[in-house]
Image: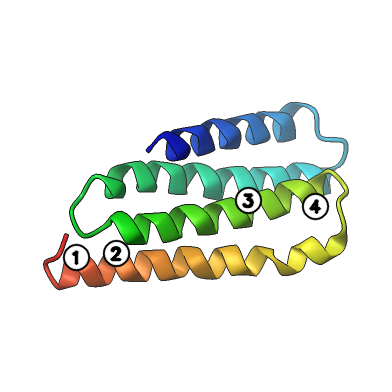
């Protein structure tokens, strides 16, 4: 839960930087996208991680959002473009985490 709270703080900082200090529209968009996904998933992890049967799906959600957002943040500050190939891995992990959570709810394990 501590990591999820820190993730939310990072998302707010990235979003603020994108809104006030980004040097191009593309940079602002990368930061905004990363921040919105990271913030939503940080809150979701906080909500899900305390429920029985949802700890593992929340870890997958957390890892996916971190990979997704951080790869976008690094692209925004000019890091190598190959990092863009990592972003979908984070997206797939987020989808997997949500599907896992849905299955846990469906089976009554959450």
Dividing the picture into quadrants, the one containing residue 47 is top left
Residue under pointer 4: 75
Residue under pointer 1: 105
Residue 93 lies, in percent from the top left, at 50, 67
Q: Which of marks 4 and 2 is nearer the N terminus?
A: 4
Q: Do the residues labelled 3 and 4 touch (CB within 8 Å)?
A: no
Left-right relation of 61 to 11: left
The secondary element bearing badge 1 is classed as: helix
The secondary element bearing badge 3 is classed as: helix
Q: Residue at x 53, y 70 (%)?
A: 92
Q: Which of marks 4 and 1 is nearer the N terminus?
A: 4
Cα gap from disc 2 to disc 1, whole angstroms: 6 Å
Q: Residues within 10 Å of mark 2 (few under 14, many from 20)?
A: many
Q: Considering the image in quadrants, where does the N terminus appear?
A: top left
In the figure, 105 relative to 6: above or below? Answer: below
Q: Which residue is drawn at 58% across and 37% down?
A: 11
Q: Earlier in the sequence, mark 2 or mark 3?
A: 3
Left-right relation of 99 to 22: left
User: Which residue appears farthest toward the left when viewing the image?
Assistant: 108
Residue 74 lies, in percent from the top left, at 77, 48
Cα gap from disc 1 to disc 3, whole angstroms: 27 Å
In the figure, 5 relative to 103: above or below? Answer: above
Residue under pointer 2: 101
Dividing the picture into quadrants, the one containing residue 20 is top right
Residue 24 lies, in percent from the top left, at 87, 41
**Which residue is at the front of the view, 99 or 15?**
99
Q: Are marks 2 and 1 in contact (CB under 8 Å)?
A: yes
Residue under pointer 3: 69
Q: Residues within 10 Å of mark 4 (few under 14, many from 20)?
A: many
Cα gap from disc 4 to disc 2, whole angstroms: 30 Å
Left-right relation of 7 to 102: right
The secondary element bearing badge 4 is classed as: helix
């Amino acid at each position: 839960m501590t990591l999820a709270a820190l993730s939310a703080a990072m998302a707010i900082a990235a979003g603020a930087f994108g809104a006030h200090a980004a040097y191009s529209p593309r940079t602002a968009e990368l930061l905004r996208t990363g921040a919105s996904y990271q913030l939503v998933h940080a809150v979701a992890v906080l909500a899900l991680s305390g429920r029985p049967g949802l700890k593992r799906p929340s870890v997958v959600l957390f890892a996916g959002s971190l990979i997704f957002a951080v790869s976008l943040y690094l692209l925004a500050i000019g890091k190598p473009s190959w990092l863009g190939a990592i972003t979908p891995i984070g997206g797939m992990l987020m989808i997997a985490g949500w599907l896992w959570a849905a299955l846990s709810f469906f089976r009554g394990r959450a």
